[in-house]
Amino acid sequence: MAMTVPATRLGRATLSRLPAESRPAVRPGEAKAGVLHLGLGAFFRAHQAVYIEAAMAARGGDWGIVAVAPRSRDVLEALRAQDHLYSIVTLDASAERTRVMGALTGTVHAASDPAGVVAQLADPAIRVVTLTVTEKAYAPDAAVPRLLVDGLIARARADTGPITLLSCDNLPSNGVVLDKLLSGMIPAELRDWYDVSVRCPSSMVDRIVPATTAGTLASAERCLGARDLAAVAGEPFSQWVIEDSFAGAVPDWAAGGAVLTGDVTPWEHLKLRGLNGVHSGLAYLGALAGCESIADAVALPGMADLLRRYVATEVTASMTPPDGVTVAGYGDAALERFANARLGHRCLQVAMDGTQKLPQRVLSVLNTVADPALATLIVAAWARFAEGTGDAGQALPLDDPRAADVRADLSTEALFGPGGVLEVPDPTHRRMIEEWRTALATHGAADLVRTAVR
Ligand code: CS2
């Protein structure tokens, strides 16, 4: 009988056997911890960790990362069993590369050990906190702000120095949002300390990182010759624009490949509207049409033209881009990235949390421009998606913190009228949404997209 030999697990002991191009850019464990990251998801592992590792490789410094898993233990257990090493599979349209990351120094499980997170926040070695906690975590009753405030109180009492809190979530002015939230919760007697010792710069983050699949793990194992249960996959493109406003020391972000700027706002608007809004459009129209992946949705006849038109007209009219960038050119590049079939990014992943995403992605356009002919189609597609059934009768799950409110009354007036989950104040625009909903129900998304732009 054939015996299968269990594959070796990735760990420090396996590093010397890796091909040179797959080894970490820093020696694992050499740098001490300096960054605390909240949100141990795939995006952090394929984005911020890469820049911080590159900054350490270029300029040194104790910027090892302690990563906090909010709820699930799976990734944390996998990392602990691998000496906190993991790999990134970069998915080019035609090839793939895998590299092990050496920037993580530890992990904490917030749900079972909140005191451990507070202790990290009070530790003088930790001078930067990065966050990927999703849009819905930026609410006064959510767990993350509470944990941060408890940590800041402990830090102020221990007098362990200034700290920069860097939001990396897809929200406009994410730093301002975080700062308002925290300064509203910090006890009055610590206000002066907070004003002097805490900075919340805004940042724009970008890299398409689909959820890890069995295929990701198999690719990593093929390349590493060892099993990596914390591997992630991402596209080749990556960008991080950070507001240059810090409290105390920070990694040399620029040496790590990030762009520092005095004002991130135009970058945030460009990315949220010209990329994420288009992504959401693809997710809802694609899911209705029966597409599994975003790349399948881009390939629907007429889809790329329709979304190109949307960016060139409505998104362009809604904003002023950063110097030297055209909104239409940016949109074209985003569509090319979405067409990368190797990503296998599922429409349903991007479709999640629509009520939390669409305001900054699409309503920011719809409610600003004179003729939101296509922005209204995107939100109409969301509304039809929320009805729960695709064009071929397939069930579509509504994964959204406000799902109950949405389902309570799915009429256009209830969803988009005064007090609705997504407010569209102009009744003419609500009528346009209603007309698109009727057209989607009559023709189906694929036919409508094929004929919508001629
Ligand atoms: C996507 C984003 O899931 C989503 O809502 O639009 O995660 C997108 O892939 C990233 O923002 C790209 O940087």
Image: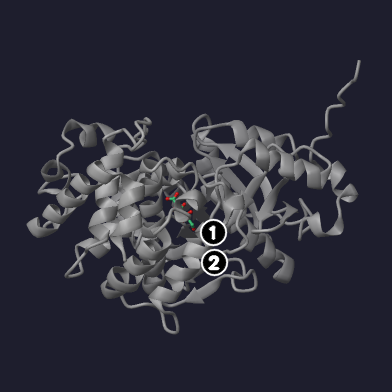
Q: Foreground: 227 or 443?
A: 443
Quarter that holds the N terminus: top right
Residue 364 seen from this side:
yes
Quarter that holds the C terminus: bottom left
Horizontal and vertical percent position of residue 177:
33, 58
Horizontal and vertical percent position of residue 385:
31, 40
Residue 177 vertical position relative to residue 144 in the rendered view, above or below: below
Give the labeled residue for mark 2: 239
Residue 245 seen from this side:
no
Comes first in the chain, label 1 or label 2: 1
Specify few, some or many for label 2: CA neighbours under 10 Å numbering under 14, 14-19, or 20 or more: some
The residue carrying mark 2 has its beta carbon less than 8 Å from ligand 1: no
Label 1 – label 2 distance at C-alpha: 7 Å
State left or right for residue 250 relative to residue 27. left
Residue 447 — which label? none
Q: Quadrant of residue 173?
A: bottom left
Q: Is label 1 in contact with label 2 (beta carbons under 8 Å)?
A: yes
Instruction: Say which amino acid is labelled 1.
Output: Arg
Instruction: Say which amino acid is labelled 2.
Output: Gln
Horizontal and vertical percent position of residue 354:
33, 46
Q: Residue at x 68, y 35 (%)?
A: 78
Give the labeled residue for mark 1: 207
Q: Residue at x 41, y 65 (%)?
A: 271
Q: Secondary structure at mark 2?
A: strand
Which residue is outermost to the top? 1
State left or right for residue 452 relative to residue 247. left
Specify few, some or many for label 1: CA neighbours under 10 Å numbering under 14, 14-19, or 20 or more: some
The residue carrying mark 1 has its beta carbon less than 8 Å from ligand 1: yes
Q: Foreground: 208 or 123?
A: 208
Q: Foreground: 266 or 147?
A: 266
Q: Quadrant of residue 229?
A: top right
